[in-house]
Every structure is written in C-alpha cells, then in structure tokens.
C-alpha cells in the first residue's frame, strides 16, 4: 500500500503543473480580451478573391 | 424622394449622392474607402455585415503635428529605430468587420507588420516598420479608411495603466488549495479507526498544512493588511474579525496536527478564503468600454499649431503654449487655452463644456474659452492664459480631484462589524474563562472555536453579492456604475442636484419661426438653399421643413461661420447670422437662430430651442416626495419660467453658476449633513460631480463623452432614475435582512462552540453552507427587487 505515497505525490505534481500553466495563461494576457478572438477566428480564410464572389452570391 | 442609403456606411445619402461602381455613396470618403478596399481585394468587408463602415473625416492637415518627433515619442510604446509598437484608441470600432479591416492593415501597407484589435476596449495595437511607413502615415491610413485614432493630451501624460491581475491569482491559489485540501481531509471524516488510514494520517495532514500556507500568506494577505490598517486608525472594520478567524483557524489547525490532537480545520480555512475572494471578484465588474476617470485631458489635443512672427506654422505640444502666443485653430479643432480671436470667423461649439448643443458665433476681438470646438473654418487666437490656468482647467487644481477616492459614507458592513467584533470577542473570552475553571484544555478549544465559527463569512459576502448583482442588473439597463458600493451611497441620498443644459434638455431641438409670414415659394427657396450647405444647423432646418425642392438655385455661396446666399428666379435669399443679413441685434445673443432675408427684406428668424427630455415632469414628480430637488445651471435665467411651469413647486433654481461655484454649492450642501446626488453632463459639472457623494453623468453616446464620475447613465434611460434610486434603497434593506440571517447562523455556531462541540467536520459543513445560503438569498432577492420596480 505504500504505492499511495507515490500516487498522491504524482497526482499533486500533475495538478500543480496545470495550476502553473493556468497562472501563465493569465499572466500572458489571454483573458484580458474575451471577445475579439472569438470573432477573429472566423476571418482567417476569407481573403481569397474567388471565394468572395461565390460567397456574396450565396448571401444574396 | 426615395431614400437611398450609402453602400459603405449605411447613412441616408441626402443631397450629395455619389455613384461609383453602380453603388450609392453618401460622401467622397466612403467612396474612397470602397475604392481602397476594392483595389486591395478586401471586398468581403461588405459581405460581413451590411453597410459596415464609418464615415471618414477630411484628413488634409489634421495630423501634421505628428511630424514633431517629441510628440510622437510620447505616443509609442516601443521604438528601436526600426520597429515601432503603438496602441491607438479608435472610437469608431463598432462591429466585426471593423476588427477584420483593422487586422488586415498589413495588406494596405507593407510597412505594417501586424495589428491586433481589442474590441471591448476599442483599441488597436500596431507593429510597424518606421523605415517603410512613419507614424503620421499610419494614422492617416487608418483615418482614410474611416478609423480615425483618437489622440488626446491624456495619451501623452498618463503612464500606461497596468492590468492588476493579483486578485485572479489569489482566487486561483485559494481555489486550488481548497480542492486539494478537501480531498486530503475527506478520508478522516468517515473512518476514524482504520489501520491504513492511521498509517497515512500524518502524511495527509502534512500536505494539507503545506497547501494552507500560501492560502494564508498570499490569498488572504489583503484581509490582514486591511485589518491592520483599520486597527491603526482605531476602526474595527469587517476585515478585523475575518483576519482573526483566518489567523486562529490556521494556528489552531497547526497546533492540532503538531500535537496529533486532530486533523485541523484546513479545508474550512481554504474554503472560507476562497468564498470571500469570490465575493470580491463578483463585486469587481468593470466596463471596459467606459472610463470613469476622465478629466479635461481626454478631450484636449496633444499638439497645437503655433504661428510665429514670420507667419510660419509650427506644431508644438500643448503644454508648451505660453501667454501671448498666436495659435491657429482649424475647422473641427478644440481650443485648448483661453484666448482672444485675432482673425477669422469663430463658430464655437461648447458642447463638451456646457452640454449646449448649438455653436455660438464670435467675432475677432471676442474672448474664447478653452474647451470650445471651432466649427467654421480656421481662426487665429492670441493666448491670454496658459492651459493649466484657463477658465475651465483651473477647476482641476481643486483638491477634490487630487484626493484619493475613498468613500466618505461609511459602509453598512463596517458599521455592523464593529459591534459584532466586540460581542464575539466578549463571548470568546467569557467562554474561555468559564471553561478555564473546569478544564484548561477545553478552554483553549472553546476560545478558538468561537472565533473560528464567528468569522463573519456570510456577513462579509452578503453586501458584495447583493451590490455586485445589482450593479450588473443596472448595467444591462444602460446605467453603468464605477463600483458596486456606489449603490450603497445611492441609497442614502437625500438631495438631488441637476444640471440643466444637456441633462434636462436633450440634444434634439425644436425649431420655431418668428417674423413675417413666409409664402410657400419662400419656404421652397429656403429649403433649396439649405440643401447645398453641410452646416449642422442647415441640415437640421432642412430636415425640419417639409416642402419640395426647387432646382434653380443660382450663385450659391457659403460663408463659413456666417451664412449662405443664393438666388432663385432672380430673387435673392440670405440665410445666416444677424450680422450676415444685416440685423443689428442686441438682446438674446445666447439664442441659436437663423435669420432670413429675401430680396433685401428681413423676413424673420428660425429659433432653435432646446427641448426638455420627455418624461421630465413625471420623473420630477416621482422624486419630489422623497428628495430635495435642485437645478443648478450655468445658463442665464431665461428658461426659469418655462421650467417652473413644468416642474413641481418645491424645486429650487440656481442660475449663472460657474464650474467652481457648482462645486462649492455641493460642498455647502454637504456641510449641512446632506447626501448629495449630482446629475450632470458637461466638463463644467466635473467639479460638482467629483465633490458630490454620488456623481452621475448623463450621456447621449456612452462611448464618446463623460467627465469623471461614479456612474454613467445613457440619456435614453433618464426616465428610470427614480427606479434606480428605489432599487438601491431596497437592496440595502435586503442586505440588512441577510445580516440577520447570518447572525442566526453565527449564534447557532457559537452555541455549539462554547460547549466545545465544534468538530472539524461540523465546521467543514456549517461554514460553506451558511455562506452559500446567504449568497443565494441576496442574489435572488436583488433580482426580484429589480424586476418588481
């Protein structure tokens, strides 16, 4: 049953790892603007010219 | 006439329709934007939302001051001679296609490396290569596609604000520790004498202890600091019993595990701190797109055009302007200093300062005050006061603006906690003395138990959640408060002071004609002439006159700042100021009007009258019974009669009040032990807003303008003021009820504690349960209050 020591220590290490990852994401400013990224991800590929024409026909 | 809408910005095309590429545009700017976007294959801008753009402003010379490297260096965040990073505030960001266009700026100019928009804050951060595109060109590029950066004096003077994320870290640490400690403490709650459990007991306890250290030392730090500060000033604030509870919890638990007396209360400790911090987070709702801290610097330009003796133009930072300098103020520029007009026709819009919606015309030799916006052509002025000493800005020298904003009304929670703390300490000490005679071990146990269970968690959470929730509900209704405790102050108000112009009046005006009868032909002629003019007043009158248009306008001429003239069927029309048509006018210079002269005969004038907000009378009637109402206006008494007919008799009126007088007036009321709510809008109210217990700014457009205040109310919600006040009062009542509930919990807990019966498991169940039930009670309660009113 001494394996419990290892198990708990390992689980705590994993938990702490995620905890520090979270702190790092906060520090990098990821949560400062919660809105813009949600819009930005929709834009990426729409610049190609041909697609635009197709698209505008569909929307009409 | 069928209305046609601009393909780019969606505005009504009125008279000056342009057709390009088979599409309608309302102005040249919109057409240009379309062309630029078209050339660069960014047409899908138009697919994203219908009519998404904003109207570009004429940009000719506006940004010339950005050639001055001193000014530019104040605006950039990073500059190594090649790569420059700068953040711009762009008020016209309003939809998803704005983000798209701005983030594709690198397609319009190769010098721009990357751009990132923060939509809620309406800012864009650009990285560009100065060897390819300079700062000014970047600004002009953005302006040309309709996203004019808003550059003000504030950008230069204020240190870049740091985002404070400490509270998030504190909550994260407390939450993390809470979860893990609970996991470790759970086995001991259920099986007391199991072999394996006894084996691992000290290991589990050790881990719990280690996790509890950062909770006390880091997460709960602010409570200890605040309690210490309070005690130093001999105030028993709510943080004193909280710190006492947390401290005792930690010491007692550590003592317990060291001497192997029990498992301690580490889970309760972490849970308590976690919930308390959550309350703090909840109370801290920030509206990113609003600023409550603005002063005149947010509205004043960063640079001005100086004319030297040889008539050369220089751009200098506005702080360097000296008495006696000559400045050139262009169309649409703000006058940053008090001065005398040397030449040019001034038409000055003081809406920033007074809330007055129409420009006032001034001639050379007249004095102009800082804060006015020049509307008609360029003027030259001679500076008579430095910027910091002008009529308007000297107001900010007043101590009220330098004092750190602390709430002068003592909060309800702190008032109650004072008595609470004394009672709890008394119970703990008496309990300990009582048990000391019977059993010394139990005495320590009882003393600590009482302080642990009495830790006013529920008490401390009631106000943050009730006020925080009300703050959100108000926010949904377009009433934005700076901090949640403003609601508490609102509930105590007994005097309401209103500004008049811009606060009680709306920006929509009513146009009245007075003079000789005008024939239909005259009116058609007037309307046809107005059609040619782009002036704000012409536009308003044009829309107000309901007649067809004649196309035979000849010899049309517009004199900026004066008026317009033209002939129809050989009949001449003059429309404009009194001087322009040749009327010698003495009285009523404050009225805004257009004089009409047809065939050398003065016919009459169109008067633009401010209209009072709809529901004004009913709002005052509702407020009259509970509050003392005062109108404090910078205007003359002209409107007094009209107002007194409209409003209840108990309303008091004070006219001709200067900004400083307004501030002093509020101070005077406060010295009579009144709690004052000031409702205003212009920069001239800024002093009064800062001095009052609660200052609320009314704003027609939330994004553009509001002086420093405690809350911003959207003008269209003016009628709801009585409702907000009522809700605030009832929220305070709700908090009082929840205090009673938490007292019941506390005395139940103390009843157990004095008997020495408070085991860790009871504490672990009892403490979160009491907190959560109080939080639920106030949250639902405040929702019901808001709905019912």
Image: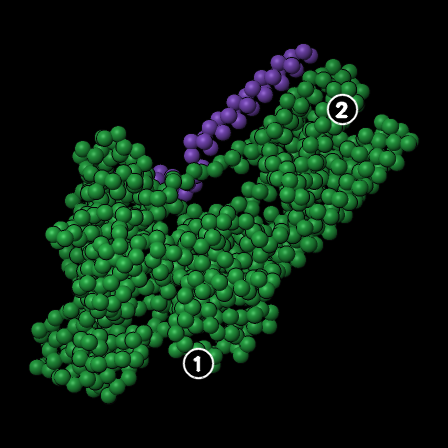
**Quick one: label 2, few (<14), some, or many (20+) residues within 10 Å?**
some
What's the CA distance linking mark 1 and mark 2?
A: 78 Å
Foreground residue, A57 or B351?
B351
Comes first in the chain, label 1 or label 2:
2
Q: Quadrant of the C terminus of chain B?
A: bottom right
Task: Point out residue B754 in the picture as x, y percentages from the top left corner.
Answer: 83, 37
Task: Point out residue B216 in the picture as x, y percentages from the top left corner.
Answer: 63, 30
Which label number is shown at residue B641? 1
Which label number is shown at residue B256? 2
Is residue B522 in view from this perspective? no
Same-chain check, marks 1 and 2: yes
Residue at image position (26%, 86%) is B515
Where residue B378 sits, quadrant-wise, is: bottom left
Foreground residue, B66 or B780?
B66
Foreground residue, B443 or B513?
B443
Tell me the chain of label 1. Answer: B
Q: Is residue B600 left or right of residue B256?
A: left
Task: Point out residue B694 in the picture as x, y percentages from the top left corner.
Answer: 52, 58
Q: Is residue B706 above or below residue A5?
A: below
Residue at image position (18%, 75%) is B580
Q: Is residue B707 above or below residue B202?
A: below
Looking at the rendered structure, the secondary structure element under dot 1 is helix
Q: Is residue B6 above or below residue B277?
A: below
User: For the residues carrying marks 1 and 2, which lies nearer the camera in this image?
Assistant: 1
Task: Point out residue B153 in the picture as x, y percentages from the top left corner.
Answer: 32, 48
Q: Is residue B6 above or below residue B228?
A: below
Q: Is residue B397 left or right of residue B128?
A: right
Where residue B612 sits, quadrant-wise, is: bottom left
Residue at image position (58%, 42%) is B280
According to the image, what is the colour scheme of the structure?
Answer: by chain
Colour purple, chain = A
Colour green, chain = B
């Amino acid at each position: 049953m001494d394996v419990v020591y290892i198990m708990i220590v390992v689980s705590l290490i994993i938990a702490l790892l995620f905890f520090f990852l979270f702190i790092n994401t906060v520090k990098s400013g990821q949560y400062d603007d919660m809105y813009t990224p949600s819009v930005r991800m929709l834009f990426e590929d729409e610049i190609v010219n041909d697609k635009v024409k197709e698209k505008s026909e569909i929307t009409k | 006439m069928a209305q046609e809408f601009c393909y780019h910005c969606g505005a009504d095309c009125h008279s000056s329709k342009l057709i390009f590429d088979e599409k309608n545009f309302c102005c040249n700017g919109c057409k240009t934007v379309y062309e630029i976007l078209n050339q660069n294959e960014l047409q899908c801008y138009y697919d994203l939302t219908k009519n998404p753009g904003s109207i570009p402003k004429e940009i000719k010379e506006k940004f010339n001051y950005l050639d001055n490297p001193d000014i530019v260096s104040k605006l950039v965040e990073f500059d190594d001679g090649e790569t420059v990073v700068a953040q711009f505030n762009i008020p016209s960001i309003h939809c998803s296609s704005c983000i798209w266009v701005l983030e594709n700026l690198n397609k319009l100019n190769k010098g721009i490396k990357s751009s990132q928009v923060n939509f809620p804050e309406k800012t864009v951060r650009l990285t560009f290569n100065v060897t390819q595109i300079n700062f000014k060109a970047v600004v002009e590029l953005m302006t040309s596609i309709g996203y004019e950066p808003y550059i003000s004096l504030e950008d230069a003077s204020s240190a870049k604000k740091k985002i404070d994320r400490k509270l998030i870290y504190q909550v994260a640490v407390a939450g993390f520790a809470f979860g893990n400690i609970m996991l470790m403490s759970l086995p001991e709650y259920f099986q007391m004498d199991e072999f394996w459990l006894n084996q691992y007991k000290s290991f589990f306890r050790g881990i719990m202890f280690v996790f509890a250290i950062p909770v006390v030392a880091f997460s709960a730090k602010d409570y200890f600091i605040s309690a210490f500060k309070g005690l130093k000033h001999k105030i028993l604030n709510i943080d004193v019993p909280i710190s006492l509870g947390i401290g005792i919890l930690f010491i007692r638990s550590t003592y317990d595990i060291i001497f192997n007396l029990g498992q301690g209360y580490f889970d309760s400790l972490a849970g308590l701190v976690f919930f308390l911090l959550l309350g703090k987070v909840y109370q801290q709702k920030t509206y990113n797109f609003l600023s409550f801290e603005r002063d005149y610097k947010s509205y004043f330009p960063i640079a001005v055009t100086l004319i030297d003796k040889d008539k050369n133009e220089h751009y200098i930072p506005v702080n360097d302007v000296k008495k006696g300098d000559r400045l050139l103020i262009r169309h649409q520029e703000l006058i940053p200093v008090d001065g005398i007009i040397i030449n040019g026709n001034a038409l000055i819009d003081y809406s920033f300062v007074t809330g007055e919606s129409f420009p006032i015309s001034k001639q050379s030799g007249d004095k102009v005050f800082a804060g006015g916006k020049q509307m008609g052509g360029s003027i030259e002025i001679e500076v008579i006061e430095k910027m910091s000493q002008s009529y308007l800005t000297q107001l900010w020298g007043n101590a009220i603006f330098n004092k750190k904003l602390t709430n002068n009304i003592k909060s309800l929670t702190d008032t109650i906690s004072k008595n609470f703390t004394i009672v709890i300490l008394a119970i703990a000490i008496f309990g300990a003395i009582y048990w000391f005679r019977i059993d010394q071990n139990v005495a320590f146990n009882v003393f600590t138990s009482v302080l642990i269970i009495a830790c006013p968690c529920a008490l401390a959470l009631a106000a943050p959640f009730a006020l925080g929730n009300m703050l959100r509900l108000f926010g949904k209704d377009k009433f934005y408060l700076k901090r949640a405790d403003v609601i508490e102050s609102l509930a105590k108000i007994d005097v309401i002071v209103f500004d008049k112009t811009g606060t009680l009046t709306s920006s929509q005006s009513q146009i009245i004609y007075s003079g000789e009868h005008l024939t239909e032909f005259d009116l058609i002629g007037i309307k046809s002439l107005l059609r040619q003019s782009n002036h704000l007043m012409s536009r308003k009158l044009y829309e107000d006159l309901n007649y067809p248009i004649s196309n035979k306008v000849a010899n049309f001429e517009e004199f900026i700042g004066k008026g317009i003239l033209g002939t129809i069927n050989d009949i001449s029309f003059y429309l404009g100021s009194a001087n322009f048509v040749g009327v010698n006018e003495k009285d009523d210079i404050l009225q805004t009007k257009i004089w009409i002269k047809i065939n050398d005969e003065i016919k009459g004038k169109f008067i633009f009258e401010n209209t009072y907000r709809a529901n004004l009378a009913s709002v005052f009637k509702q407020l009259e019974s509970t509050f003392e109402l005062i109108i404090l206006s910078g205007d003359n008494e002209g409107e007094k009669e009209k107002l007194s007919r409209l409003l209840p008799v108990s309303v008091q009126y004070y006219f001709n009040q200067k900004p400083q007088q307004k501030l002093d007036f509020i101070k005077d009321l406060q010295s009579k032990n009144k709690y004052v709510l000031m409702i205003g809008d212009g920069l001239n109210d800024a002093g009064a807003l800062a001095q009052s217990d609660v200052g609320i700014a009314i704003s027609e457009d939330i994004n553009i303008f509001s002086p420093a205040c405690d809350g911003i109310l959207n003008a269209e919600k003016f009628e709801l003021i009585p409702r907000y006040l009522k809700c605030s009062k009832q929220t305070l009542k709700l908090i009082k009820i929840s205090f009673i509930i938490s007292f019941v919990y506390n005395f139940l807990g103390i009843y157990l504690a004095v008997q020495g019966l408070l085991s860790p498991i009871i504490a672990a169940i009892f403490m979160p349960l009491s907190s959560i039930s109080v939080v639920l009670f106030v949250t639902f309660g405040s929702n019901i209050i808001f709905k019912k009113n």
